[in-house]
Amino acid sequence: MNVGNWDGEQTIVQQYLNAYNSGATAGFQFNEDIDQYNTPRWGVYTGVIKPLVHILNLVKDDPASKNLYNMVRIWKAYAFMTLVDTYGDVPYSEAGRGYVEWGGINYPKYDKMADIYADLYNELKTATAALSASNEYVTSDLFFGGTASSSPALITAQVSRWRKIGYSLMLRLGMRYSKIDQTKAASITQEAFAGGVILSNSDNVVVTQYNTTVPNGFSNQQRTINTFNYYLAEPFVNQLKSTNDPRLKYIGASYANPANITTTRDTVTANQYGFPVGYDQVSVLNYPGYRGTKSGGQNYTQLNYSVIASSVAPAFFITNSQNQFLLAEAKFRGWITSGLTAQQYYEAGVKAAMDEWNLFPGTFIPAVTDAEKNGYLLHPAIAYNDANALKLINTQYWIECMTNGAEGFANWRRSGFPVLQPNKYNNNLNGGFVRRMAYPNAEEAQNPDNYKAAVASMGGDGLTQHIFWDKP
């Protein structure tokens, strides 16, 4: 599930970018619809959906695999949310069936995105309800399994955690409707909250098992190519720097030689500068305050390759922090009436996000001290207030999702925060923003009739069509 790349959603939401336009590197920083940057997220379909459908087909009638069956249904819902949020209409009802049926369905139809979302809600509701401590322990569970032998206590704990995953996804799904149907958003959000979502970092859905043999491909990929091309984006660095965010030192670093990440790195907050959005190595020469070059690269902040982009960095999928922020917004909107206040959820979300850095290499425990957390929450630009609640909550969600581009991109479109300025490199987007990724070029050749039907349904296959819940 750890697919995508740094040049994808993080570039769209102005956290990260490629500063060099050499033709082959043209992508979202230059408002270009380039297949190599659209395609990686399609790996959820080719590399995740097909095996999950196969597993479901194998165990659906096995009474000894009831929990496994429903866990896979929940994770399949997660995967399809990612696909819909990225592309819009996608193969759903016929997806993966070429693997499991005689003769197969090799040219699956594309289902309408709103219909997929409606079915995902039903899948999450029924699969989560069907999990039971009376069923089996799933040793193969990557997140909360692994024990060779089971016990009633282990089964109960595993089922409890997967119920929280199911309801956390339902919370996320419900909040997606906030721009188009607030009644539905409130109803689903309340249902998920009542069911019980992840509210502790110990229940985070995170992969920590990476090592030198099996590295984190997403975090590791930029290490193996020309690192001098890549920098943190100015809006993101400015947000962290202006608020003295203690996470900046783990996210960004300035290297003596941008092409060599083993050279001396500077993580002092005052010395970090983001590369401007909508510029390349030539046009940036005219950017006010341009900082020049060094050792063949740009004199700007890059990823911290010893921490956030370490080859063994953890991969977060669903977190306590994300849920706390969603609940803060839901409470502010009046969609949930019990629990904590919006301010308490917001502050808990910030603290939970900072505690995630305890799992990264190159940090200490605690990675962020209580004094740093409390001081940060008192900063005038961070301290909670109702007048700026939605901006504050969703800006923190943006920061929290730095390593989860699909979710960061989705929530930015849903909430409208942080408010970013359009990329003015050219007018390819008519002065607007990327709202979706285009389908891989191979789809037009491999599944042409269904591809064309989907494009007609959505009004095009460009970067500016809106996902159904992303009301213009």
Image (spheres, grey):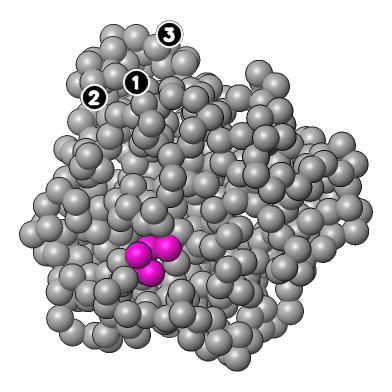
Residue for badge 1: 461
Residue for badge 2: 458
In the rendered image, residue 464, in percent from the top left (x then y), is placed at 34, 29
Residue for badge 3: 445
Left or right: residue 59 versus residue 173 is right
Question: For the point 65% across and 40% down, which residue is it?
Answer: 287
Question: For the point 37% across and 34% down, which residue is it?
Answer: 432
Question: Label 3: few (<14), some or many (≥20) within 10 Å?
Answer: few
Where residue 327 sits, quadrant-wise, is bottom left
Question: Does 412 sit above or below residue 424?
Answer: below
- For the residue pair 114 and 67, the one nearer the viewer reads as 114
Q: Secondary structure at mark 2?
A: helix
* Quarter of the image where the C terminus is located: top left
Question: Label 2: few (<14), some or many (≥20) within 10 Å?
Answer: some
Inspect this view and state whether residue 6 appears.
no
Question: For the point 62% across and 70% down, which residue is it?
Answer: 247
User: How far is mark 3 from mark 2, CA to CA?
Assistant: 19 Å
Nearer to us: label 3 or label 1: 1
Question: Does 378 sit above or below residue 157?
Answer: below
Question: Label 1: few (<14), some or many (≥20) within 10 Å?
Answer: many
Q: Are marks 1 and 2 in contact (CB under 8 Å)?
A: yes
Q: Are marks 3 and 2 in contact (CB under 8 Å)?
A: no
Q: Amino acid at mark 1?
A: Asp
Q: Which residues are magenta?
A: 391-395
